[in-house]
Amino acid sequence: MKTILLRLLCAVGALTLSTGALAQAGGAYPSKSVRIVVPFAAGGPADNYARFLAQRLSDAMGQPFVVDNRPGGGSVIGTDVAAKAPADGYTLLMMSNTHTVNETLLPNKPFQLMRDFVGVAPVNYSDLVLVAHPSLEAANLKDLIKLAASRPGKLNYASSGPGTPYHMAGELFKSMANIYLVHIPYRGSSGARTDVIGGQVDLMFDAVTTMAEQARVGRVKAIATTGLKRSDVLPDVPTLNEAGVPGYEATIWLGLMAPRGTPKAVVDKLNEVVTRIVAQPDVKQLWTKQGATAMSMNPAVFDKYLRDDIAKWARLIKSAGIKPD
């Protein structure tokens, strides 16, 4: 009897703690609008998927989820804004592997990812595509490598900023193909994309989700995609792995984090709703057409995923001697 009573008391205590955590976040969560800080420029994959997810979260949770773009500094500016926000569940961060790269690439930034944030849920991942302006004298990847080798430092590639997946994809390509390309960092992917299309920059690694249509209409030349298998969005375009750089693989993934100290009950509730959203058949179907694949993990597994990714990029950055521009 004493054992049963003790278990009942523990269960009541756990319920009280959970209810108390929600109360700290302002009652039944959410009780007001929630801000999703996107530390990247409008128009890129992070912004597009944040807006899609914000609408679905609004529908599911009965309060507005509003995107707040804060680009600049290779994601540092907006991320710092989120890090300094109250840990009450009403500010979230849309993050990507830019953030896990920056843990090594930018050690003096004003925040530390795993110290100042807690993982909420992953969202999805997608391949990138290496594109060139149509005037570039390279019909395929092998041509491009030969051209770059014959003109060291003469060709350049754009990215949305130091430490972004586009930058790291370029640095990985340089290292594995043993060529030298000049990195041209922008404050966001939209500016980089515009200048590649306009011919001011030679090359760019960009998300398949946003560059495929530009390739189809001939504004850019699709050289290769970055997955280990061909993209369903650009099935006629070979991968770097098959076209001349064996073993090459780079993707962009997205996830949600919250300021550390956000009540666990809120984090768990958000994880549950996001997981349910990305598993919906219409979402999976739409994202497959765009070249994206849904990701699902509970907060503890996502935390390990983030720590492992930080370690992976740290090894690459140190071995290749990559420095921020």
Image (cartoon, helix red, strand yellow):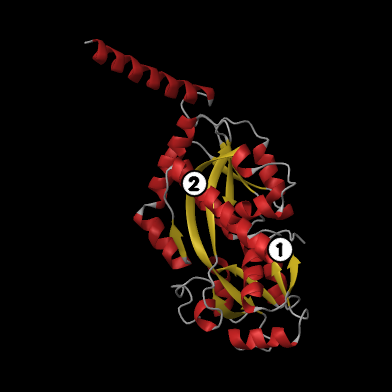
From the viewer's perspective, tell me whether residue 228 is left or right of residue 73: left
In the picture shown, does residue 137 fall above or below 313? below
| Residue 114, percent from left and from top | 59, 42
Q: Which residue is mark 2?
A: 304
Location of the N terminus (image quadrant):
top left
Residue tagged 1: 322
The reply to whether residue 62 is in sight is no
> In which quadrant is the C terminus drawn?
bottom right
Q: Residues within 10 Å of mark 1 (few under 14, many from 20)?
A: some
Question: Distance of mark 2 from mark 1, alpha carbons?
Answer: 25 Å
Q: Amino acid at mark 1?
A: Ile
Q: Quadrant of residue 189?
A: bottom right
Quadrant hosting residue 156: bottom right
Residue 246 drawn at (x, y percent): 52, 78
Please provide percent x and percent y for residue 180: 72, 77
183 left or right of 210?
Answer: right
Give whichever of 40, 242 is nearer the camera: 242
Amino acid type, mark 2: Lys
